[in-house]
Image (cartoon, rainbow, N blue to C red):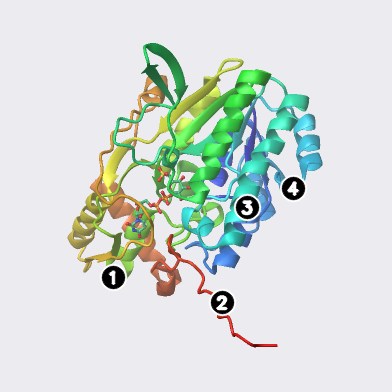
Amino acid sequence: MRICILGGDGYLGWPTSMHFAARGHDVLTIDNMGKRLWEARAGVAPLMPIKPFPDRVADWNASYQGKPIRHAVIDIATDYAGLRDVLTDFQPDAIVHYAEQPSAPYSMAGRAEAVDTQQNNVIGTLNLMFVIRDHCPGVHLIKLGTMGEYGTPNIDIEEGWLDVTHNGRQDRVLFPKRPGSLYHLTKVHDSANLEFACRVWGFRVTDLNQGVVYGIETDEIAADPANRATSFHYDSVFGTVLNRFVVQAAIGQPLTVYGKGGQTRGYLNIRDTLRCVELAAMNPADEGEFRVFNQFTEQFSVQQLADRVAAVGRSMGLYVTTQHIPNPRAEMEEHYYNAKHSALPALGLKPNLLTDAMLRDMIAKVTDNRDLVLDSHIMPSIRWDQRPARPKIVRGAA
Ligand code: USQ
């Protein structure tokens, strides 16, 4: 297949690019370096230093015997012509779209970050929609959405769609959305725009509502971690919760459970992200079909994850404690959660469920790099309820 990966420099985009290339596909990977800019603005960095995008592609191409990965630096939100030209030339069979600002805390830091997130994510996807409509009709778009689009409703979460009976009549509607951050809202807006594109322009779209991803390694990274490492974050802005807990355990800091810790989400290993995207690509959506898969393999509360990491850490001789800190987010800390996730297993997904051995391996790998961890990046500083202090009005001032 000819596959285009948008967001190819990111935590998931880079391993996905290598995964498809290693399986003989023709890969074009595109990024705008936006993640590196957002990291700089937030004052954080991935655990392992990451080479510049062209260099990591060149390293891969030099070490791998198969088809080389092609790459381009394009900002899909601001450079419509650049995106149009490169996709018109490449004519992909599938496009995997990760090219979005991925952090809920970043989007809640203030007006500039919220606007940046919404502009980058929603306008980027809109530009892509017009390139597809006018220059790559028929391509299968695999869009990374999020389980966070649904929020935590007090009913079972279906895979994208809900059959409703109202006043004696029946219909099938998009599952109601109640996301928990301005970042998660961008994915809701994208989903609505793409469902429209399927209905009106006959697009083929798979919206992967992905849960929280954890993990450091994939097969391709394991073969050459020094040159192929992905941007693994442990900071409070871009780090996902299990990755953070693993780092905290490795450096002897208390595990930062926000609030009561009953927040329950779907989780999956980074290796399963790659496999899910591959399964979606190999089994494309039909013309006019807006298909939604809930992409996670098991659900945990934050407290359950902390308990698992603490137990494994202690078995390795580490001193691990848990600290319940005031929740910087506005979210339910105890709630019902039961999300369906049968579509991807039905296509053949064999999940890598979270095991103690996996946690031990992650903690050991982080311990090898513990000198790189900056303690000051651990505690959260962005609050959902923060408001600027009111300007002081001085009466009678000139
Ligand atoms: N949490 C803690 N302690 C921490 C960090 C997080 O208790 O130190 C809690 C959060 O309050 C939240 C849960 O852990 O209840 C998950 O937080 P997270 O930061 O791991 O994940 P989230 O902000 O939801 O976002 C991440 C990715 C995002 C993706 C989403 C999938 O950054 O790109 O869309 O996971 S989902 O959560 O299913 O919406």
Residue carrying label 2: 391
Q: Position of residue 257 (x, y in %)?
A: 28, 60
272 w.r.t. 50: above or below? above
Mark 2, secondary structure of its residue: loop
106 w.r.t. 17: above or below? below
Which mark is nearer the camera, 2 or 1?
2
Picture residue at 65% right of the left edge, 53% below the top: 53
Separation of disc 2 and disc 4 at Cα? 34 Å
Mark 1, secondary structure of its residue: loop
Which mark is nearer the camera, 4 or 1?
4
- Numbered badge on residue 78: 4
Residue carrying label 1: 252
Q: Of the residues shown, which amino acid type is indicated by label 2?
A: Pro
Which residue is the extreme one toward the bottom? 397
Of the numbered discs 2 and 4, the one sitting upstream in the chain is: 4
Of the numbered discs 2 and 1, the one sitting upstream in the chain is: 1
Left or right of residue 368, residue 62 in this image:
right
- Numbered badge on residue 4: none
Picture residue at 43% right of the left edge, 64% below the top: 383
Q: Compare residues 165 and 174 and report the one nearer the observer.
A: 165
